[in-house]
Image (cartoon, coloured by chain):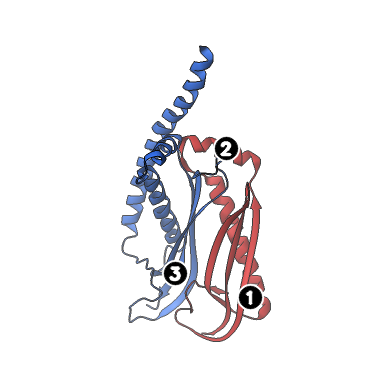
Chain colours: A blue, B red
């Protein structure tokens, strides 16, 4: 009886732990992302490789930002259930959304005084770390060419 | 060395092409860090140790690419691309490649 309790109790405990901490962390992260995005909103990040401007470019350099993020036990559990019925995995999309926006913010932060970022590319890759080979840990990298215009 | 992921360097002209240059590195994770990352998988969130590791490897790969370009006599690399792949459990390869060019400023 006690063995059964432990067998069921431990995974449920882990999922609850993931739910509680994961939710708090996500809220906090979104708040920080929104705040920083607002602060940088006037500097353009483009996926095009040219900018329409009458000023000529003075300097350019590569800007890179990356983040490695992992899913919490609660999201993983419900995503597992979702696999039975199909449909959008909402819990994973919010995770990847956070990671992408964070990576772009870090790329911006690597060249804080730039006038713009051209040819922004975002790449996502799963890195080894999840024991069952599923989605556990993902890396998101954003890179672009930061430019400084002639004043 | 000026790096760019566009086909040209904004504000300057390319005078010579030297072909593709690349740099790569394969890094394994520290077992202690991997264990902590496993714990982090319960509560979710960012894995700072991994972010750091991959950033280090990326700058190492970029350095190697830059070395190669310098040997060829280039002063800029355009059209830089990155690729990450896990080659074995617990190890990942970071590759970065681009075209070495000479530019006139």
Q: What residue is pinned by disc 1? A: B69
Most extreme residue toward the right is B71
Q: For the residues carrying marks 1 and 3, which lies nearer the camera in this image?
A: 1
Q: Residue B54 lies in what quarter of the image? A: bottom right
Q: Quadrant of residue A51?
A: bottom left
- Separation of residues labelled 2 and 3 (CA atoms): 35 Å
Is label 1 in a helix, a strand or a loop? helix
* Residue A92 x, y percent position in the rendering: 40, 45
Marks 1 and 2 in Cβ contact (< 8 Å): no
Residue A42 position within the rendered picture, expressed as x and y whole percent measured from the top left: 31, 64
Q: Nearer the viewer, residue B57 or A128?
A: A128
Spatial separation of the CA atoms under disc 1 and disc 2? 38 Å
As drawn, is A151 to the left or to the right of B84? left
- Which chain contains the residue that carries disc 2? B
- How many residues crowd mark 2 within 10 Å: few (<14), some (14–19), many (20+)? few
Question: Between residues A90 and A56, which one lies in front from this camera angle?
Answer: A90
Q: Is residue A118 above or below residue A101?
A: below
- Label 2 residue SS: helix
Q: Quadrant of residue B34?
A: top right
Are dots 2 and 3 on a single chain? no
B32 or B75, nearer to the observer: B32
Q: Are marks 1 and 2 on the same chain?
A: yes
**For mark 1, does the 10 Å Cα neighbourhood hold few (<14), some (14 to 19), or many (20 or more) residues?**
many
Q: Would you place residue B32 above or below residue B75 in this image? A: above
Name the residue located 45 percent from the left edge and 67 percent from the top edge.
Answer: A144
Quadrant location, the N terminus of chain B: bottom right
The first of marks 1 and 2 along the sequence is: 2
Tell me, yes or no, whether the two marked residues, 2 and 3, touch with CB atoms within 8 Å: no
Q: Which mark, by number, is residue A146?
A: 3
Question: Residue A2: x and y, percent?
Answer: 52, 12
Residue of label 2: B36
């Amino acid at each position: 009886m006690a063995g059964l309790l432990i067998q069921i109790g431990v995974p449920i405990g882990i999922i609850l732990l993931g739910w509680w901490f994961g939710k708090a962390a996500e809220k906090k992260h979104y708040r920080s992302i929104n705040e920083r995005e607002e602060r940088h909103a006037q500097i353009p990040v483009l996926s095009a490789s040219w900018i329409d401007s009458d000023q000529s470019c003075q300097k350019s350099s590569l800007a890179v930002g990356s983040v490695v993020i992992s899913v919490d036990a609660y999201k993983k559990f419900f995503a597992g259930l979702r696999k039975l019925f199909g449909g959008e995995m909402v819990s994973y999309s919010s995770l990847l959304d956070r990671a992408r926006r964070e990576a772009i913010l870090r790329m911006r932060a690597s060249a804080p005084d730039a006038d713009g970022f051209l040819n922004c590319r975002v790449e996502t890759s799963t890195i080894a770390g999840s024991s069952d080979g599923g989605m556990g840990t993902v890396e998101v990298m954003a890179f672009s060419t930061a430019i400084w215009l002639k004043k | 060395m000026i790096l760019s992921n566009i086909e040209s360097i904004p504000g300057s002209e390319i005078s010579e092409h030297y072909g593709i240059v690349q740099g790569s590195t394969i890094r394994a994770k520290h077992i202690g860090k991997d264990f902590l990352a496993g714990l982090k998988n319960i509560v979710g969130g960012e894995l700072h140790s991994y972010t750091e590791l991959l950033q280090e490897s990326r700058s190492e790969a970029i350095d190697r690419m830059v070395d190669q370009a310098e040997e060829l006599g280039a002063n800029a690399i355009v059209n830089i691309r990155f690729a990450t792949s896990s080659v074995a459990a617990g190890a990942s390869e970071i590759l970065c490649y681009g075209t070495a060019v000479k530019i006139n400023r």
